Amino acid sequence: MLDVCLLGTGGMMPLPYRWLTSLMVRYNGSSLLIDCGEGTQIAIKEKGWSFKPIDVICFTHYHGDHISGLPGLLLTMGNADRKEPLTLIGPKGLERVVSSLRVIAPELPFEIHYREITEPEQIFEMDGYRLKAFRVKHNVICYGYTIEIDRAGKFDVQRATEQKIPKEYWKHLQKGETVELDGRILKPEMVLGPPRRGIKLTYCTDTRPTDSIRKNAKGSDLFICEGMYGEKEKAAKAVEYKHMTFTEAAQLAKNADVREMWLTHYSPSLVRPQDYVDKARKIFPATIAANDGRTVELKFDDEG
């Protein structure tokens, strides 16, 4: 239902065995990218996914390892004769930062639409899903994101029949559409049960643990969270540079009652993240030290 790929898992600089942290999701024929550091388009090619359906690119913040790959990606899209507009979402200064990067990509055959985040929490209604940005705590303005797909209640045939609603209108009501029939207004709630659990994905990187993360990640099917340091002796460094350790991320996952957590954004000095994941699993058992290209298809509960 929602295809999720963690394209890269590195922080600060790309390495021969690790691309910079970036997330790509696919839903209903459209793709969204969160962060685009150096080499991100190579990671997309390695995965075998297409650039063409990317309609939205979000940025957590404007450090180079999260945005410096944008000019190359824009040029690749342009060379593929893209004509559809591209939406960019990010913190204050979005258009200024992107315009600076576009000195080397000045002419594109498609429009860029800028949507700047101006509030501590801000919702963007997308095509079939809801994107929410929430402020986190780094040494520059930085945001995490949640992607939520709502799911309507089950269609109640008996209620529809009792209310003499013609069958040809059932599919419209199932889709949440309101129908007018001979002066009568038919609403979805007339035939649908209570909303069912949908799909929720939360992504955050470059931050200290915050209550905003816990609150917004609450109940996520998948929580992708930075784990810059696995080593216990790096805890002070995490505080100084406003990052997180594996165990801090695990505590957030536990407090937010998520189903699964993938760690990402590893320090270049952290060569084998899996060597440090056991301590995190003692706090939150469903912790995974993700590798580049890790992929999952998130489905509704009864579709598994």
Image (cartoon, rainbow, N blue to C red):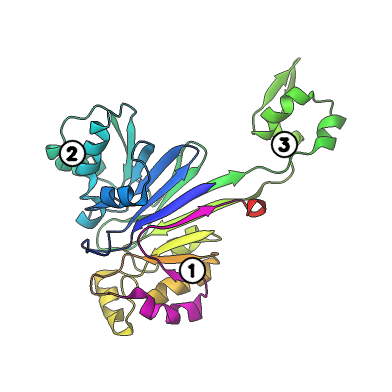
- Give percent across and percent down for residue 52: 35, 36
Is residue 117 in view?
no
What residue is drawn where x is 16% and y is 36%? 105
Q: Residue furthest left?
A: 103
* Residue beneath disc 1: 253
What residue is drawn where x is 25% and y is 43%? 94
Which structural element holds mark 3? helix
Quarter of the figure with the C terminus: bottom right
Q: Could you tell me if the residues under marks 3 and 2 are in contact, i.e. CB atoms within 8 Å?
A: no
Stretch in magenta: 272-299
Is residue 201 in view?
yes
- Give percent across and percent down for residue 302: 67, 52
Is 217 positioned to the left or the right of 173 in the image?
Answer: left
- The answer to which of 55 and 255 lies nearer the viewer is 55
As drawn, 180 above or below 12 = above
- The answer to which of 184 and 205 lies nearer the viewer is 205
Question: Mark 2 is on which residue type?
Answer: Ser
Sequence-first disc among 3 and 1:
3
- Residue 270 in the magenta stretch? The answer is no
As drawn, 158 above or below 202 = above
Question: Mark 3 is on which residue type?
Answer: Glu
Question: Mark 1 is on which residue type?
Answer: Ala
- The answer to which of 114 and 158 lies nearer the viewer is 158
Which structural element holds mark 2? helix
* Residue beneath disc 2: 99
Q: Residue furthest bottom?
A: 233
Is 76 positioned to the left or the right of 55 in the image?
Answer: left
Sequence-first disc among 3 and 2:
2
- Residue 297 in the magenta stretch? The answer is yes
Q: Could you tell me if the residues under marks 1 and 2 are in contact, i.e. CB atoms within 8 Å?
A: no
* Residue beneath disc 3: 189
